[in-house]
Image (cartoon, rainbow, N blue to C red):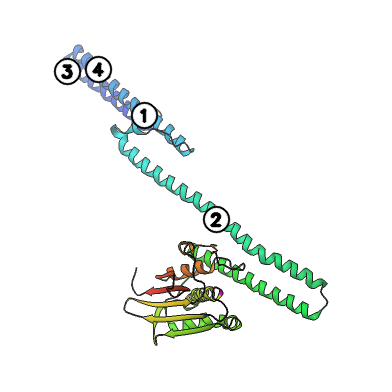
Amino acid sequence: MFRNPEVKRWAFVSLAFLAAWTAFCAWAAGLLAGSLAAGGGLVLLGIWLYVTGRRYERLERLAADLDRLLHGERLLDLEQYREGELSILINQVQKLLLRLTEQSEVLKREKVYLSDSLADISHQLRTPLTSLHLIFSRLQKETEGQERRRLSYEGVQLLDRLDWLVNALLKISRIDAGTAVFARDWVLAKELAGKAVSPLSIPMELREQQMICEIQEGAGFMGDFSWTAEALGNIVKNCMEHTGIGGTIWLKAGENQLYTEFVIEDNGSGIDPEDLPHLFERFYKGRNSSDSSAGIGLALSRMIVSAQNGTLKAENRQEGGARFVLRFYKGVV
């Protein structure tokens, strides 16, 4: 208690005042009055020191309990401090403890998620790297020109896949970190559809698939052309991969007073009902996913759309196949 400069200062002031008051009473009313004044003052000073000492004992116990809390102990009874002047402090401490506990749980979940994500990333990268090692080891032994060309083509395809994986993961990390910059330009739906579908024209031709676009003239929205083309392209690519030989994919776009909407449909196998709630989760691979699927294309698409005040949902068509509905709202939703 006396380590506190304020307590020592008040004790010194009280003693000085008591001495002065005793001397005054003795001078004015005699020694008896001075003795009574001194005795009464000492009693009051003693009571004050006792009460202050008890308060500091409670503060020391509270400090010890808080120290144990800081070192991870959670089963402490703080109800003993609910009465008196410490109750307000305890209320604030418990609020702080609750917030720290919540943050600790969030950090634990994030660490587990990060660990799982790193494991998924390493697995996604290891598969094409292992294939590349095998291909190049065979290339070193292969002498026939046709076989060498086939292996070289497979190697280039795997390198393209690695390049896409790395770029997609970097984009996801930028959006997560809040460092991705999205432009606010007028994006025409027709131009956006052309940009998104163009890289897939040859694969679709090889699959004998038909692409039907129905774009409302002049429809558009305020957003980022390049990022949104990436999102739309990933959705169309997903439809292409889950539509059989000779299948059809529809891309429709229109605008109304509330939003600009893109609808991508296919007549493929559709989405398994068990996969629907998890379809946009990072690294999630559905039952009908191919071996080359990384499970990040649709997750990246939703992140891009959400970052631009949009929504993206998936469902099955009554006629068979999948439907993706992408909307960019003109107001905050």
Tell which residue pokes out farthest to the bottom in this image: 217
Identity, as a three-letter code, of the amino acid under mark 2: Leu
Query: Where in the figure is residue 60, as x and y percent of width and height?
Result: 40, 30
Say which of marks 1 and 3 sits in front. 1
How far apart marks 4 and 3 lie (CA) works out to 14 Å
Identity, as a three-letter code, of the amino acid under mark 3: Ala
Whether the residues at callouts 1 and 4 have beta carbons within 8 Å, the answer is no
Question: Which quarter of the figure is the C terminus placed in?
Answer: bottom left
**Residue 289: within the magenta?**
no
Of the numbered discs 4 and 3, the one sitting upstream in the chain is 3
Say which of marks 2 and 3 sits in front. 2
Query: Where in the figure is residue 130, as x and y percent of width and height?
Result: 70, 64
Q: Please state if 146 lies on the left or on the right of 316 as rendered.
A: right
Query: In the image shown, does 260 or 19 lie closer to the viewer?
Result: 260
Of the numbered discs 1 and 4, the one sitting upstream in the chain is 4
Residue 58's mark? 1
Query: In the image shown, does 28 or 187 lie closer to the viewer?
Result: 187
**Residue for badge 2:** 114
